[in-house]
Image (cartoon, coloured by chain):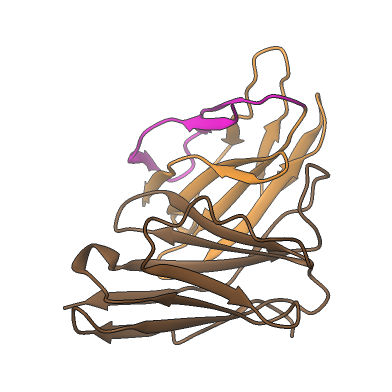
Amino acid sequence: GAGVSQSPSNKVTEKGKDVELRCDPISGHTALYWYRQSLGQGLEFLIYFQGNSAPDKSGLPSDRFSAERTGGSVSTLTIQRTQQEDSAVYLCASSLRQGGLGYGYTFGSGTRLTVV
Amino acid sequence: GNSVTQMEGPVTLSEEAFLTINCTYTATGYPSLFWYVQYPGEGLQLLLKATKADDKGSNKGFEATYRKETTSFHLEKGSVQVSDSAVYFCALNFNKFYFGSGTKLNVKP
């Protein structure tokens, strides 16, 4: 597609429930990233995928968080047993490739998750 | 390690004022540098970038020069508009993206 698409745009869930957030990157972009932006805060790196390489999961805050990327395209971020501190905007970005060659990210508009 | 530090906000200016948002970085190599902008209720958008020392990125009247000697990439605009009100993020890309904490800009008419 023309841009990075994320769904849903808003999600309200009860504490303890599982949620799945979806990201559809720009076609042909091999690198995909998930970030979290809490209210009034900066961007917290969660995970990235680059082609068929093992993902960098170093930013995942706990084992309740997981992500997968099927067929090198669509990615799903799953949060199990949600907690109120998980409330944030979850941003997905894609890039032609990862590396210090000047490739910028294109961000999706995010999923606003509210845990009540 | 790699990191980005940018000035804390919010920054409040009157329309047509001069804007500077400071950004400095530390990196283990030679990164590319970026400014992203997030308008209210929207996602992040790439504003400008510079890929090597002394490069100047520019877009929509904004400029930033990659200064290796001072490890800086300050964002400037000569005359801000109300529509520039947003959060601005400085970032570096060296094998992975590292973002600053963001600076909120409020421009009053």
Which residue is drawn at the image coordinates 45% and 57% (left, top)? A60
From the top left corner, tell me how far across and down residue B62 is, in percent.
Answer: 64, 43
Q: Is residue B41 above or below residue B86?
A: below
* x and y percentages locating residue A63 in the rendered image: 39, 63
B15 within the magenta span = yes
Does A101 appear in magenta? no
Visible residue check, residue B9: yes
Q: Colour of chain A?
A: brown
- In the picture, residue A100 is in which quadrant? top right
Residue at 42% x, 30% y: name it. Answer: B7
B92 relative to A79, above or below: above
- Of residue A30 and residue A8, the one placed in the foreground of this image is A30
Residue B11's quadrant in the figure?
A: top left
Q: Nearer the viewer, residue A5 or B57?
A: A5
Chain that appears orange = B
Residue B65 is left or right of residue B24, and the answer is: right
- Image-based side of A54 in relation to A58, left or right: right
Is the residue B31 above or below the residue A2 in the image? Answer: above
User: Which part of the image, by quadrant, shows the C terminus of chain A?
Assistant: bottom left
**What quarter of the picture does the N terminus of chain A occupy?**
bottom right
Q: Residue A47 in the image: state x and y as whole percent.
A: 55, 59
> For this rendering, which residue is in front, B75 or B60?
B75
- Asked which quadrant contains residue A56, the reply is bottom right
> At which x and y percent is residue B105?
40, 46
Give the extent of the magenta segment: B1-29
